[in-house]
Amino acid sequence: MEYFIILNKCAGGNKARLLWPKVEARLKQLNISYRTFVTQYDGHAVELANQILSQITHAHHSDAVVMAAGGDGTLHETLLGCIGYYATYPSESKIPIAFLPIGSGNDFARALKIPLHWDKALEQILHCSKAASLTVGQYTNLDTHDEGYFTNNFGIGFDATVVHDANRSSLKNSRYFGKFSYWISVINALRTFQGFNTHVKIPGKPEDVYQNAFLVTTTNLPYFGGGIKIAPDASAYKNQLDLIIVEKPNPIQLLLFVSMIFLKRHLSLRFIHHYVQKELLISTKDSRYGQIDGEELGERTYNLKFETASYPFWIR
């Protein structure tokens, strides 16, 4: 087995840069065959994944794995590159993706029971013997007809606003204080965030309208936001997506929401709405920030179709 590693040294507030020498030393100690490709800018992992798969195909290399080493954003870009390649060459057998979680959020790792410590995660990868087909989210912008995919979630509203603010915090790239940028952004967003108009359409059913949406997240995993279990029963092994809509809570409802989420009973609250579908449509009338797997989309309105897709992952 040969591992083609896409490494984001900036992941986790540069934590990955410090950990990588230890990872590499372990690979050499175990005489593992690998090649490393280091990302240089946002979106570079997409290009690298495409280049790697082209090399593997031309070399007729059937015993290969593409490993994303970084955070959820690195995994997201790696998936996009791989799916993009096979969209061009649909007859080729798909090379699986492994994930070495050395970033900050690592919600994908939590959901798939990948150890969060690099040495145990690497050991699990190296002892894997076959790929597992996992569900990933697919979305289509119905205005532009652009398509995209996500391994974790597509969020509109509160969570995306937090991502936007945290990415602009002076603490963001600090190894020790980076996580505080997220929680400071949470507090600021709670103070200032305004609800927005959201429409949900399930094929064959009447449209649901929420005039004061606070958080709209479509996910195939239980976790978001670095370990918050927003959709407790969601699973990448199920061919479905979970949509969670939280209407803007008042202070008492907010405290209730926070309390209940730790008990995994928040979905019973009357201002929280839960859908489980293979296909659904979401549109917003007001501009709000959006995010995919923690990567910013900017502030805009949305007119989206969500569906399930699948890809092989190197997960034991």
Image (cartoon, grey):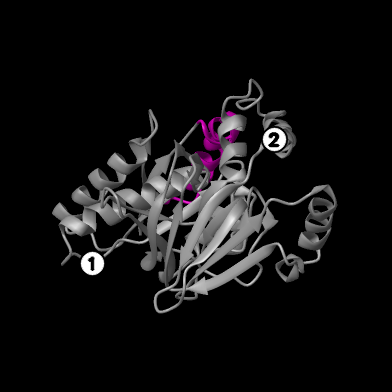
Looking at the image, do the residues carrying marks 2 and 1 touch, with CB atoms under 8 Å apart?
A: no
Find residue 154 and report its horizontal and vertical position in percent. Answer: 49, 53
Which residue is painted at 56% across and 33% down in the image? 164
* Residue bearing mark 1: 93
Counting residues from the start of the chain, the first of labels 2 and 1 encountered is 1
Judging depth in this view, the residue of 72 and 233 nearest the camera is 233
Magenta region: 10-32
- The local secondary structure at tag 1 comes to loop
Which residue is painted at 26% across and 52% down in the image? 145
Furthest residue toward top:
170
Question: What amino acid does circle 2 point to?
Answer: Lys
Question: What amino acid does circle 1 point to?
Answer: Ser
Residue 179's disc number: 2
Judging depth in this view, the residue of 263 and 62 nearest the camera is 263
- The local secondary structure at tag 2 comes to helix
Which residue is painted at 79% across and 60% down in the image? 262
Query: Seen in the image, is 307 located left or right of residue 92?
Result: right
251 drawn magenta: no
